[in-house]
Image: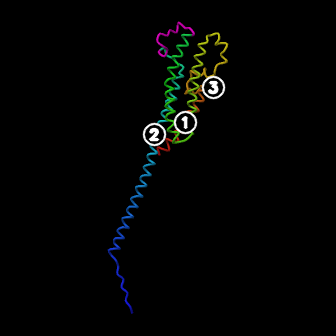
């Protein structure tokens, strides 16, 4: 009977096992690093999204507040130009005075609308056309108010007699210059209702994104 002797290469086997353990460790380390990188990317994306949503909310509320301030029914004496005397009214003086008042009121609203549009560009990249549409509707309300202010001043400029004859020919928005967006009883003011609707839709969109990023 022949005897068979097998010689085991222990140094070679140990070297192989050592290399295998190192390879497994490298793969495990790479897997952990990859998962960590993905988690970091998600966290960063969440931070960016939340920050944009927060900025958009702030810009939206700034538009709402300056819109209300621009339409305030109360006009203080300090809003009129220096030297204006309400006891010495002429159509020309009244035109210049109200142009001064309404331009001064509209300036903060215009700046707020520009900020909203600027922040909106970042939000559009993240969320698509939905946010663009909602911002567009808000800025349309700003444009309509500006048009109404111009119509209001023109009514004064043409004089009392012609004003009585041409009143029906003016834009309905001229009658919406002095109102409050927050007045719950003002349900017949089309511009007020349009802005409320636009702001409400924006608030719902912001609530969705702020809640998502916060969690």
Residue 114 on image: x %, y % = 50, 30
Name the element at disc 3: loop
Residue 89 among magenta residues: yes
Tell me the crowding category of disc 3: few under 14, some 14 to 19, or many 20 or more residues within 10 angstroms, Cα based: few
The residue nearer to you, when weighing 74 against 87, is: 87
C-alpha span from label 3 to label 1: 22 Å
Magenta residue span: 78-91
Comparing labels 1 and 2, the label whose residue is closer to the camera:
2
From the viewer's perspective, is 112 left or right of 8? right
Residue 164 on image: x %, y % = 65, 12
User: Does 30 sit above or below residue 7?
Assistant: above
**Please, which residue is most extreme toward the left here?**
11
Residue 136 on image: x %, y % = 57, 33
User: Does 29 sit above or below residue 208?
Assistant: below
Q: Which residue is mark 1?
A: 202
Badge 3 vs badge 2, beta-carbon distance below 8 Å = no
Tell me the crowding category of disc 2: few under 14, some 14 to 19, or many 20 or more residues within 10 angstroms, Cα based: some
The residue nearer to you, when weighing 156 against 4, is: 4
Tag of residue 51: 2
Comparing labels 3 and 2, the label whose residue is closer to the camera:
2
| Labels 1 and 2: the sequence-earlier one | 2
Query: Which residue is at 47% across, 15% downward?
Result: 78
| Labels 3 and 2: the sequence-earlier one | 2
Q: Which residue is mark 3?
A: 188
Comparing labels 3 and 1, the label whose residue is closer to the camera:
1
**Please, which residue is most extreme toward the bottom here?**
1
The residue nearer to you, when weighing 7 against 166, is: 7
């Amino acid at each position: 009977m022949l005897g068979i002797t097998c010689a085991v290469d222990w140094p070679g086997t140990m070297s192989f096992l050592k290399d295998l353990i190192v390879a497994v460790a490298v793969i495990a380390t790479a897997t952990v690093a990859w998962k960590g990188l993905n988690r970091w990317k998600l966290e960063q994306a969440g931070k960016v999204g939340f920050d944009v949503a927060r900025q958009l909310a702030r810009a939206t509320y700034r538009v709402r507040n300056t819109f209300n301030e621009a339409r305030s029914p109360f006009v203080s004496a300090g809003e009129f130009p220096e030297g204006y005397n309400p006891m010495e009214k002429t159509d020309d003086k009244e035109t210049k005075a109200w142009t001064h008042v309404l331009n001064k009121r509209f300036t903060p609203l215009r700046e707020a609308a520009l900020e909203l549009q600027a922040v909106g560009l970042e939000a559009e990249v993240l969320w698509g056309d939905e946010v663009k549409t909602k911002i567009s509707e808000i800025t349309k309300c700003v444009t309509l108010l500006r048009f109404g202010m111009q119509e209001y001043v023109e009514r004064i400029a043409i004089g009392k007699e012609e004003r009585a004859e041409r009143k029906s020919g003016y834009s309905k928005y001229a009658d919406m210059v002095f109102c409050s967006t927050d007045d719950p009883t003002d349900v017949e003011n089309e511009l007020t209702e349009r802005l409320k609707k636009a702001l409400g839709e924006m608030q719902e969109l912001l609530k969705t994104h702020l809640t998502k990023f916060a969690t």
